[in-house]
Image: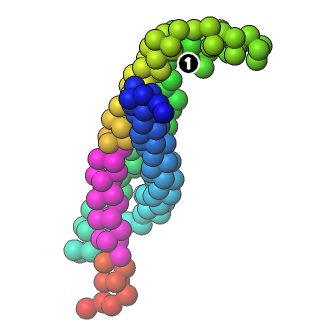
Amino acid sequence: MANVEDEFVAFERHVLQDNIVLCDAKSGFLIAIAAGVLWRCIEGVANFVMPDPGLAGYVSYLYLILYILAVPAWLVAAYWALMTVRPRMMQTGGNLDWGAPLFQKSQDDFVASIRGTASDALMDGMLRHLHSLGAVCNEKCHCFHRAVRITAVAAIFFVSAETIRFGISLLRFFPS
C-alpha cells in the first residue's frame, strides 16, 4: 500500500493536470467563439450603410459604434485565451523535467539511474514537479479568467449591436 506522501503527490498531480487541461479546453472554445463573432463584427462595420435621417438613422450609428467597440474587445479576449493555452512548463533542475539529461540516456541507463536514486530524492523531485505544475495551473487560470471577463464585455457590445441592428431592420420592414 502506498504511503500518504505518494498518495498526496498522485492526487495533487491529477488535480493540477485536470485543471490545466480544463483551462486549455475552455480557452480553445473561447478562441473559436471569438473568431466567429469577430468576423461578424467586422462584417457589420464593413457593411454599414449610411442611414436614413430620423431616429433609426441615429440608432444605426449606435450599432456601428458598438460593433467598433466589440472588435478590440474580442481581439483582447482571444489574446488572453491564447495566452492560456500557451505552453509554460519550466525546468526545475530535477529528474522529472522534460529536458533533464536523465531522459537522454538509454532505457537501461535510465532505469538504473532511477533505481539508484534515494527515495527521498525521488520524492523531492516529485514535489518540485508538483510546484511547477501548480505555477503553470495558476498562470493558466489567471489568463483564462481575464479572457472570460473580457469576453463578457465583448459579448455585451456584440449582442447590443445585433439587437439594435435587428430592431432597425424591423422598423424598415414595418414602417409606421
- Is the residue 126 above or below the residue 150 in the image? above
Say how the picture is coloured: rainbow
Residue in view at x 42 percent, y 32 percent? 7
Observer-nearest residue: 5 or 21?
5
Residue in view at x 49 percent, y 10 percent? 121
According to the picture, the residue beneath numbered tag 1 turns out to be 96
* Disc 1, SS: loop
Q: For the stretch drawn in magenta, what is the main secondary structure?
A: helix
Q: Is residue 91 visible?
A: no
How many residues crowd mark 1 within 10 Å: few (<14), some (14–19), many (20+)? some
Q: Is residue 58 left or right of residue 76?
A: left
- Is the residue 52 above or below the residue 90 in the image? below
**Residue sitting at the far front:** 1
Range of magenta residues: 147-166
Q: Quadrant of the C terminus?
A: bottom left
**Residue 148: horizontal and vertical position, in percent?**
34, 48
Observer-nearest residue: 156 or 21?
21
Q: Is residue 105 left or right of residue 164?
A: right
**Residue 101: horizontal and vertical position, in percent?**
65, 8
Quarter assignment of residue 157: bottom left
**Residue 172: horizontal and vertical position, in percent?**
35, 83
Observer-nearest residue: 172 or 83?
83
**Residue 51: horizontal and vertical position, in percent?**
34, 70
